[in-house]
Amino acid sequence: MGDFQPSIIAFTCAWCGYPSAVLAGVNRIEYPTGVNIVRVMCTGMIEPAYIMRALEYGADGVVLVGCMMENCHYMVGNKKAQERADTLRPLLDMMGIGAGRLRTEWINASERVRFAAAMKDFSVALKGLGPNPLGRLGEGGVEAGH
Amino acid sequence: MAEEEMTGGKGRVGVYLCTCRGDVSKHIDLDRLAAELSADPAVAFVKIDSELCAPSGQGALQKTHREGRADRALVGACTPNIQGLIMRAALEGAGLNKYLYEQVNLRELCAWVHADREAATDKAVRLMRAAIARSLLLEALEDIELDVVPEALVIGGGVAGMQAALEIASRGFAAHIVERTGALGGRAYKLSVTFPTHNCGICCMQYCRECVLTPKIEDVMQNPRITVHLNSEIETIEGGFGDRNVVIRTPGGKKELRVGTIILASGSDVFDASRIPEYGFGVHQDVVTTMDLERMLEQERVIGGRFVRPSDGKTTPMTVNFIQCVGSRDRVKGNLHCSLVCCTYAIGQAREIKKLHPKTEVYVHYIDLRGPYRGFEEFYEQAKAEGVMFVRGRVAEVREKKGRLYVLFEDTDLGRLIDMPSDLVVLAVGQEPARDSDRIAKMLHLQLDQDKFIKDLNPNFPPEYRRGVFVAGCAEGPKGIRYSIDDAKTAAAAAADLMVAGKIRKTRAIAVVDETRCRGCGKCEDVCEYHAAKVVVKNGRQVSVRDPARCEGCGVCAAQCCNRAISIKHNTRPQMEALMKAMMAKGGAGARGKGEEA
C-alpha cells in the first residue's frame, strides 16, 4: 500500500480546465503521473454514468475541472456538472466507493498553479482513501457481471 | 533523434510521434512508447519525427498519409489548439477527414510536468492507448456551412464602434451602431488633450473648439451604409451563427434587426472614486476625478470661463495634487489591473494646467509611471521641463483641516511623511468593466476574464470558434484611443471577411437526437442556453430537434437526457467509454477497450 499511486481521470473543459493544465505544463509545474487528462468541450457533458464508468474501469478518483462558476463558456455547463456531482456523491458513499473519489474544481484558464495544486491535493487525499474498491474487482470482475 | 518508423499490424490508426526537437523525447522514452504502440493490432505504423509542425514535418505527415496504410491519424505531440491545427490542416491537405484526426498532448500534459522519465513514459503509453481506442470509433464528418447575413451590428458608438462601422461600410456592408447615450464618440469625445500630440491630434475626436465638428462623427453620420441608433439599447439577441435577430429599444419604439456579424464595442466605465473613502471624493468639493477636471478645463479652454475651484467657484487653484492609480492596481478597494491610460492622460492634464496657469504648482503622486507608448518618455520629460512635479508614493489620505484640504503622503524618494495643503485634488480614476457588459456578454455567450472584462477568444483559433462575434476596444480591457481604433479595425476586418465569404463553417460536433428514444419531455429545451433544442410534433409524437446553426456542442442536454436519446457527434458515449477504459487498463498491449460493451 505504501507505493500506491492513485490513478485519476480529470475531465477538463476545453476552455478553462484544459488550458490551465496546458499552462501548468508550459510552466513545468509538476503533479503526479497518475493524473490522466481527458479533454471535453464542457464539464456539463459529463453525465453521472461517465463518472461511474471511470470508477468501474478502475480510476481511483474522478475530477471535473471547468470554468469558474458564473463564467462557464457555455453559460451553465459547470453549474449542471456541479449539481450532478452533488447528487452523485452521497450515492458513492452508499455504494461503498466513497464520496471523496469525486471532486469538482472551477478555475480560470490562467490558473496553472491552482490546477497543479488541485491535482496534487486530490492525489494525496486518494492515497488516504486507498485503491478504489471497484478497481479491485479487477479485469473481468465487473465485465463478468454483464 | 532521426526519423524512424516501426510497422505495427494491419491496423487502421497511423500514429505520429513528435520529439518536439527534444522537448518531448528528453522526458519521455519515445522509442519504448513507439515499440509498445506498434504491438497494438489497431496500429498501422508508428512514425517519429523531430518537428511535425515544421514544413518538413508537415510534408512527412502528408507523404505518409498518402501512402494509404492508415485511414485515421493519431498525433502524439503538443497541444491540439495551436500547432495541432497546423498538423491537422496538413493531413487534411493529404485527404484526411479532419474528424478522423486525434491528438494527444504529450508535451504539456506529460513530458513537461513529470520528472520521472519512466513514469512519464508509462503515462504516455496510457494516454496514447486511450486515444487509439477513441480514434477507432471516430466517424468521418463534414463541417456545417451556414450563410452569413451581410449586415453587421456594432454595439457601442465610441471610437472603437465608429471605426468598426466605418471599416465595415468601406467594404460595402451595412452596419448598425447601437449607442446607449445620445451622442457618438464615447469617452474619447470628452477628452481635451490627448497623448502624444497634447492637443486635438491623433484621432480628432475632442470636444474642443478646433474640431467640435469632428470629421469622424460626420463620416459616420454621412455614410449611407451606416445606421446610427442613439439612445438605444439592446433588448435581445437571438439566433445562431451568421444569422441573428436583434431587438433594440429606441426612443421611437422597438426595432428589429437581422445581422450576420456582431462587433461588441461597449467600452468600459470609469472607477467610482467614492469607493475609496480616504480620498474624500463626494465629501470635499475640491476633490474631483480626472473626468470632472476635463469639464473644468473645458470651461477655460473652450467655453470662455475660468478654471476655478469647485468649492468657491472663484479662485484659481494654486496647488493641484494628482493622485494616480485610483481604483487601479489596488486589490483591496479597487481593481487589480492597471488601467494603462491614466499616467498618460494625467500628465497631459497636468501640463494643460501648467500651460493655462504657470504659477499653479502641480504635483503628480504616482506609484510607477507607466506609459509603454512611443513618445511617452518625451511627453513626460516635457512635463517635468514645464514644471510639473512628480512625487513617488501612494497617497494615504485627503483630509480637511480648518477649511483647507491636506494631502498626506510619504515621499518614498525622500523617505519623508508630508502633509501638504492643497487647493484641488484630482483623482486619476481607472477603467473598469462597463456596468451592463455582463448582460450583453451573456446574450452573446461570451465569457468574462478575471477582471470581468469581456474575453475575446484567442485569435489563433479557427474563425468559426468566434461565431461571428468580435470584441473591440475597452470592452475587452483598458486601452488607449489608438489601440481601441486598431482593435476595431482588426475586428471589423474579421467580420467583413465572413460577410465577403458569405458562409461560415461550424463544427459538426454538435448534439443529435435519436428520435426513436426521445419521448419529448423537453428537459433538453430547458437546459439549452442557446435555444438550440426544441420539442416539436413529428409523425404524431413529440420529439426534440436541434437547430444546427445554434447548437454549440456543449453536451449539457445530452447529459441531462434520461433516455440517452441525445448524443454529441465526435464525443459520443462509445468513444468516451473506450477512451476511459483504455486509459485505466492495467497491463500490457491489447488491454484496449473495444467500445460500448453494455
Image: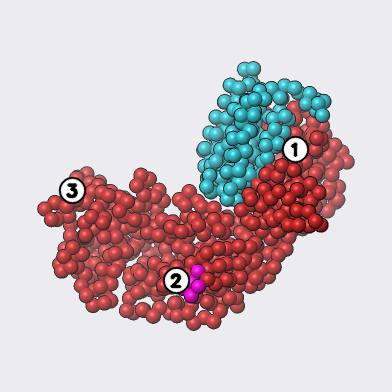
Chain colours: A cyan, B red
In primary-sequence order, the first of circles 3 and 2 is: 2
Q: Is residue B252 magenta?
A: yes
Circle 2: residue type: Asn
Residue B577: which disc? 1
Above or below — where is B530 with respect to A54? below
Which residue sits at x=83%, y=49%?
A: B71
Question: Which chain's residue wears label 3?
Answer: B
Secondary element at tag 2: loop
Circle 3: residue type: Ile
Q: Which residue is mark 3?
A: B418
| Quarter of image, res B238 | bottom right
* Quadrant where the N terminus of chain B is found in the figure: top right
**Residues in magenta?**
B249-253
Question: Which chain's residue wears label 1?
Answer: B
Above or below — where is B309 with respect to A131? below
Q: CA distance from mark 3 to mark 2?
A: 48 Å
Viewer-nearest residue: A85 or A108: A85
Q: CA distance from mark 2 to mark 1?
A: 54 Å
Q: Is residue A60 magenta?
A: no
Which residue sits at x=21%, y=69%?
A: B307
